[in-house]
Amino acid sequence: MKIINQVIFLLFACLAGCTQSEISKSDVIEVKKTNLDGAQDTEQETLSIIKPDAVCFAEKINAKFQSAGLEIVAQKKIQLTMDQAMEFYKEHREKKFFGELCTYICSGPVIVQILRGKDAIAKNRKIMGNTNPLKAETGTIRREFGKNIQNNAAHGSDSKESATREIKLFFPKS
Ligand code: RTP
Ligand code: MG
């Protein structure tokens, strides 16, 4: 009888774990528009991720985007699986830090966002600051909320091609 109870418990635990890590069952905070329909020609969209350690600072980070003229047009809190992390970071798969990078981004929930505005890609990179928080300018997200080069608070797409690929990964059109 004890063994049956343990098997049932394990089954429930596995099911709960799988459900929690699926993006489609994620904790949606707010989703407005997920494409550029109706936007000005000069506007861009970029993917932003508030990384696990910085999720508690989301309000302050979002205030920085908004005061720089970037609109948060979609946003959700999700738990990435290792497969999702490896796909997302595939450009870094040959780097020595790839394993740690993927483990870290899966270490807790993250907030994925689409930011929209004029020159959104470059603007977001400027607001985030240098990859290494110690080298980032005062007032940038990474300087204020990053701990080290790995736990550096935020991700931002680095080109139009990356933005398109990354937005599709997290906000596929239904
Ligand atoms: P991100 O992609 O997260 O916006 O950062 P980034 O463009 O500024 O930097 P990138 O070269 O694309 O690196 C991606 C993430 O890998 C981690 N990293 N660790 N241990 C290291 O030397 C090292 N170098 C980079 C960082 O978390 C970086 O954000
Ligand atoms: Mg990058």
Image (cartoon, rainbow, N blue to C red):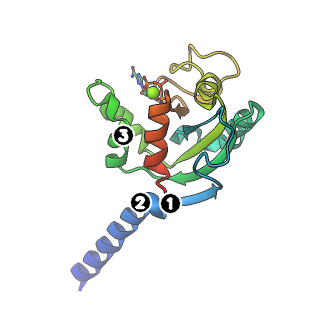
Q: Which mark is residue 26?
A: 1
**Where is 152 relative to 71, above or below?**
above
Mark 3 → mark 2, Cα distance in angstroms: 16 Å
Quadrant of the image containing the N terminus: bottom left
Query: Dot 3: within a 10 Å radius of its alpha carbon, few (fewer than 14), some, or many (20 or more) residues?
Result: some
- Image-quarter location of ligand 2: top left
Name the kind of residue labelled 1 in the image: Ser
Kindly check if marks 1 and 2 are in contact, taking CB atoms under 8 A apart as contact: yes
Mark 1 → mark 2, Cα distance in angstroms: 6 Å
Q: Position of residue 125 (x, y in %)?
A: 58, 25
Query: Dot 1: within a 10 Å radius of its alpha carbon, few (fewer than 14), some, or many (20 or more) residues?
Result: some
Q: Nearer the viewer, residue 7 or 101?
A: 101
Q: Which numbered disc, 1 or 3, marks the residue closer to the eye?
A: 1
Name the kind of residue labelled 3 in the image: Thr
Return the residue at label 2.
Answer: 22
Look at the numbered disc 1 and give the secondary structure of its residue.
loop
Q: Which mark is residue 103?
A: 3
In the displayed structure image, the side of residue 116 where residue 131 appears, left or right: left
Q: Residue at x 33, y 26 (%)?
A: 97
Q: Position of residue 73 (x, y in %)?
A: 65, 48
Task: Using the rendered view, name the quadrant where residue 41 is placed.
Answer: top right
